[in-house]
Image (cartoon, helix red, strand yellow):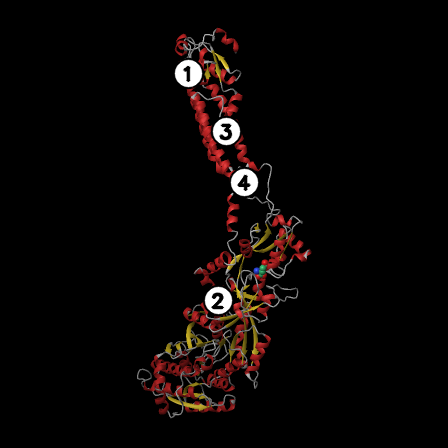
């Protein structure tokens, strides 16, 4: 049985692989054991379809079961396909084709364009490209990349298309890309594999092969190209590979190359390092044909094939059956898993993701297509390789770092000798970039921003300052207290923030000490004073009531006049009030409680006054030693609602942009004030701080809290007023789509995690350049607060408890005494009611009682002088 193939003059490798494959099938006893396949090869000119027509007809005249080739999108190829279709001879193709559907009698082992495009797009997404150029060579290239254009519409991609001009050096096109879109560092290259080295070399010649450039090569044959010249430049060059280079079959085949070549008389073809995708597909195609023939042979007897004439021949009987046997076959070939979908194209295949490293081209992952699950695909990239890749890409890179003099981020180094280059600067940002360079291996050179601005956009949409320098590619990164903002994010890329901050107010502390006539009241809050007054009145009143209630406070007016029927009570209303105030002021009192209940009231009052007086004295001492300052403004709201104190901010930073764009009425009022008084804007934060220092309290400066914190640690006359008006962070900025952003972000996170950033902050804020000077003072002033009810409330509770107890005791005393002295004729209850009425009537401090003689005798003392006679009663 013969099988035909059409190869161009330049397709030696394909031809050889075709012969190898046929040879192997013939020597393999497990496949087509009864039949010998005979290769029939014809040479064709890709562009001469008449010649190709003749060659196809000659093959058919010889009687072939299938025709391979010719490859490529040539007229010869489409002619061959239509002849095969008409005469029902299976046509096996092994090269790229743009058709969506194969003809009935045709099968293609090369992956379908849309599926390959999906793989390219997945990779572009993985590399996170947003802006890139596509440079293509032939018109077919535009068909291969049309999926990119569709995808760009869906995502926010910016794609610039370039075609290499025939007859012109490739470098012209690269030059054009570089000149018109200098920010483009990502390029999709669609060129033939044989031109790849040349194209890459031309890119190198115009400076488009640096460590910041990335290339995605659409050819599946990058592995066959000599990349020696490009592997040390750290340029990211990636592509896909279909050939399964580690398949044992391919290894075996390569090892026998010379032997097989001599066997079939092609000795002069040297073994390649790796075979081309098209050649590998020819090999797998022959295997596919042999397997299908065997299946066909087993189901029906195919007794050879008669010569078919192109002019009046009738179609081959078994052609359709043979192609139908080919389609469902799956096997592992040297291009991975071979299988087909309904349209006659490869399906469910896998591609290796290849990238260039100093060791050469390496597999860093794989891409797989799953046509069964709704055409889904998945891309797996080895994370270690990715990491290595990004680390390598920063090695030996010299970064131009733009910065601005701003304390304590970048400062001139104080030194007796004159310094040059990076040695001139010190500060947090300088240390930070040094730490990052240690992790990532790059070197850097500081350059001060020319216009001394951070970066804001003017009315024409142009950026100034460091942001402008990054956009114009005058610097690679910007590092200082550069705030991340959404407007800036549109123009440049920011890393993860290395510090958090927010806008606040810097103000000068009033220098005059505030003295008030009533500062002795300051130890307690007003409410505490009210409570104390309330306690005084209630305790005095309760003492008076308890004193009247308890019988033991009713006593003979004089010890020598015990026989009289008159009793006196010391706790009149006035005496009760003077007793409590006297004891409170620690002066004592002329009246002393005698009953248990009144003593309870007195005891609890003593306790109360002890605690209150001690607290008062202690807090008064603290108040007298601390200077109390009163600020004319307390927050942004207070600032917006006055006109006496002027306020402003930096004229080229995000603070100004914040007020200009804010929708909050207070901020809008502040912005209106600042806009109408442009003199309040400063050229640098240093100018703003100096203005506050010299201001005598009539200028406040709106500044970021991290910088305020630094300043008020050192200048104790300055202070921060109010909280933060917003929250934001400082990041390192790089040009849009810069390859440095992700590795830098990664390294910043590392510095966060291992505490280095905290250490740096501590060093530059608290230690160096006079840090910590005002910390003590801040502590002192924050320690004194007047006492609130929360501090002393407990004493009042105890007082309340004591008073309740005294009431209970008084009631007990009252009942006890009433029972003892009850009249024989009167009941105890009546006696008690009478006494109670008297007590609560509060009319007199004396009362008439009936005493029995025993009682008088017991108590009366012989030592009383005789002048205390019966007229004593008349005194009262
Ligand atoms: N950090 C600000 C910026 O990046 C500068 C200071 C400010 O605006 O307060 O623009």
Q: Is residue 198 above or below residue 686?
A: below
What secondary structure is marked by label 3?
helix
Q: From the viewer's perspective, is the residue at label 4 or at label 2 nearer?
A: 4
- Nearer to the camera, 497 or 785: 785
- Nearer to the camera, 538 or 246: 538
- The residues tagged by marks 4 and 1 sit, at their Cα atoms, a distance apart of 54 Å
Q: From the viewer's perspective, is the residue at label 4 or at label 1 nearer?
A: 4
- The residues tagged by marks 4 and 2 sit, at their Cα atoms, a distance apart of 50 Å
The earlier-in-sequence mark between 3 and 4 is 3
- Residue to which mark 2 is pinned: 434
Q: Is residue 332 above or below residue 771?
A: below
Badge number at residue 817: 1
What secondary structure is marked by label 1?
helix
- Nearer to the camera, 805 or 255: 805
On the image, the x and y values in percent for residue 337 come to: 39, 76
- The residues tagged by marks 1 and 2 sit, at their Cα atoms, a distance apart of 92 Å
Q: Is residue 136 visible?
A: yes
Q: From the viewer's perspective, is the residue at label 3 or at label 4 nearer?
A: 4
On the image, the x and y values in percent for residue 47 come to: 52, 88
Quadrant of the frame with the N terminus: bottom left
- The residues tagged by marks 3 and 2 sit, at their Cα atoms, a distance apart of 68 Å
What secondary structure is marked by label 2?
helix
The earlier-in-sequence mark between 4 and 1 is 4
- The residues tagged by marks 3 and 1 sit, at their Cα atoms, a distance apart of 31 Å
- Residue to which mark 4 is pinned: 624
On the image, the x and y values in percent for residue 818 come to: 42, 15
Name which quarter of the figure residue 486 lies in.
Answer: bottom right
Packing grade of label 3 (10 A; few <14, some 14-19, many >=20) is some
- Residue to which mark 3 is pinned: 584
Tell which quarter ligand 1 is in.
bottom right
Q: Is residue 301 visible?
A: no
| Residue that sits furthest to the right in the current view | 676
């Amino acid at each position: 049985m013969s099988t035909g193939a059409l190869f161009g003059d330049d397709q030696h490798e394909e031809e050889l692989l075709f012969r190898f494959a046929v040879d192997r099938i013939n020597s393999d006893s497990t496949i087509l054991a009864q039949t010998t396949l005979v290769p029939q090869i014809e040479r064709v000119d890709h562009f001469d379809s008449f010649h190709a027509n003749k060659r196809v007809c000659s093959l058919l005249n010889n009687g072939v079961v299938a025709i391979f080739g010719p490859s490529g999108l040539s007229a010869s190829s489409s002619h061959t396909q239509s002849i095969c279709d008409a005469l029902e001879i299976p046509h096996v193709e092994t090269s790229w084709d743009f058709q969506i559907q194969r003809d009935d009698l045709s099968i293609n082992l090369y992956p379908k364009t849309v599926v390959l495009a999906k793989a390219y797009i997945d990779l572009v997404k993985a590399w996170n490209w947003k802006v890139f150029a596509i440079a293509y060579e032939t018109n077919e290239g535009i068909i291969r990349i049309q999926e990119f254009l569709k995808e760009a519409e869906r995502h926010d991609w910016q794609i610039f298309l370039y075609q290499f001009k025939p007859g012109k050096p490739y470098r012209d096109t690269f030059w054009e890309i570089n000149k018109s879109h200098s920010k483009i560092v990502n390029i999709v290259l669609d060129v033939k594999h044989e031109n790849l080295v040349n194209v890459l070399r031309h890119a190198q010649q115009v400076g488009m092969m640096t460590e910041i450039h990335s290339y995605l090569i659409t050819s599946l044959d990058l592995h066959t190209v000599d990349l020696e010249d490009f592997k040390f430049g750290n340029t990211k060059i990636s592509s896909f590979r279909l050939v399964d280079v580690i398949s044992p079959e391919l290894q075996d085949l390569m090892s026998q190359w010379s032997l097989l070549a001599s066997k079939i008389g092609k000795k002069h073809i040297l073994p390649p390092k790796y075979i081309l995708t098209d050649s590998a597909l020819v090999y797998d195609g022959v295997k596919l044909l042999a397997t299908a023939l065997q299946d066909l042979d087993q189901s029906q007897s195919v007794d050879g094939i008669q010569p078919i004439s192109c002019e009046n021949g009738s179609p081959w009987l078994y052609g359709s059956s043979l192609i139908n046997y080919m389609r469902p076959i799956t096997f592992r070939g040297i291009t991975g898993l071979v299988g087909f979908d309904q349209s006659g194209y490869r399906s469910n295949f896998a591609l290796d993701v290849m990238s260039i490293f100093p060791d050469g081209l390496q597999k860093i992952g794989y891409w797989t297509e799953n046509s069964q699950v709704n055409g889904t695909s998945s891309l797996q990239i080895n994370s270690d390789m990715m990491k290595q890749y990004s680390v390598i890409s920063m090695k030996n890179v010299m970064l131009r770092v733009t910065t601005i003099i701003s304390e304590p981020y970048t400062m001139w180094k104080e030194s007796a000798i004159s310094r040059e280059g990076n040695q001139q600067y010190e500060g947090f940002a300088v240390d930070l970039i040094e730490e990052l360079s240690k992790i990532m291996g790059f070197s850097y050179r500081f350059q001060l921003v020319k216009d001394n601005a951070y970066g804001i956009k003017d009315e024409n949409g142009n950026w100034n300052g460091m942001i402008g320098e990054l956009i114009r590619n005058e610097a690679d990164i910007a590092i200082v207290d550069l705030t991340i903002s959404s407007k800036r994010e549109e123009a440049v890329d920011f890393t993860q923030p290395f510090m958090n901050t927010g806008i606040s107010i810097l103000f000068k502390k009033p220098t005059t000490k505030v003295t008030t006539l009533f500062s002795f009241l300051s130890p307690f809050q007003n409410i505490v004073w009210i409570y104390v007054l309330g306690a005084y009145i209630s305790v005095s009143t309760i003492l008076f009531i308890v004193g009247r209630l308890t019988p033991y406070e009713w006593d003979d007016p004089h010890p020598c006049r015990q026989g009289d029927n008159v009793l006196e009570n010391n706790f009149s209303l006035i005496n009760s009030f003077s007793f409590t105030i006297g004891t409170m002021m620690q002066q004592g009192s002329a009246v002393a409680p005698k009953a248990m209940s009144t003593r309870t009231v007195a005891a609890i009052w003593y306790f109360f006054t002890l605690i209150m007086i001690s607290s008062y004295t202690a807090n008064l001492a603290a108040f007298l030693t601390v200077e109390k300052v009163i600020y004319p403004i307390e927050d942004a709201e207070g600032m917006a609602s006055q006109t006496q104190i002027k306020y402003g901010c930096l004229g080229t930073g995000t603070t100004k942009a914040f007020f200009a764009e804010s929708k909050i009425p207070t901020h809008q009022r502040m912005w209106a004030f600042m806009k109408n008084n442009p003199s309040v804007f400063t050229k640098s934060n240093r100018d703003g701080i100096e203005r506050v220092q010299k201001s005598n309290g009539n200028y406040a400066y709106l500044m970021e809290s991290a910088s305020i914190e630094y300043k008020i640690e050192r200048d104790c006359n300055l202070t921060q007023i109010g909280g933060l008006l917003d929250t934001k962070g400082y990041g390192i900025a790089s040009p849009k789509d810069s390859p440095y952003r992700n590795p830098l972000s990664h390294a910043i996170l590392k510095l966060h995690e291992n505490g280095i950033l905290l250490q740096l902050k501590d060093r530059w804020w608290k230690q160096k350049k006079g840090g910590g000077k005002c910390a003590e003072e801040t502590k002192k002033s924050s320690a004194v607060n007047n006492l609130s009810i929360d501090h002393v409330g407990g004493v009042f509770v105890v007082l309340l408890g004591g008073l309740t107890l005294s009431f209970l005791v008084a009631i007990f005393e009252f009942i006890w005494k009433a029972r003892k002295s009850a009249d024989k004729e009167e009941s105890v209850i009546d006696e008690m009611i009478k006494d109670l009425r008297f007590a609560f009537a509060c009319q007199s401090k004396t009362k008439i009682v009936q005493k029995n003689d025993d009682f008088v005798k017991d108590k009366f003392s012989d030592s009383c002088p005789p002048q205390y006679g019966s007229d004593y009663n008349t005194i009262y």
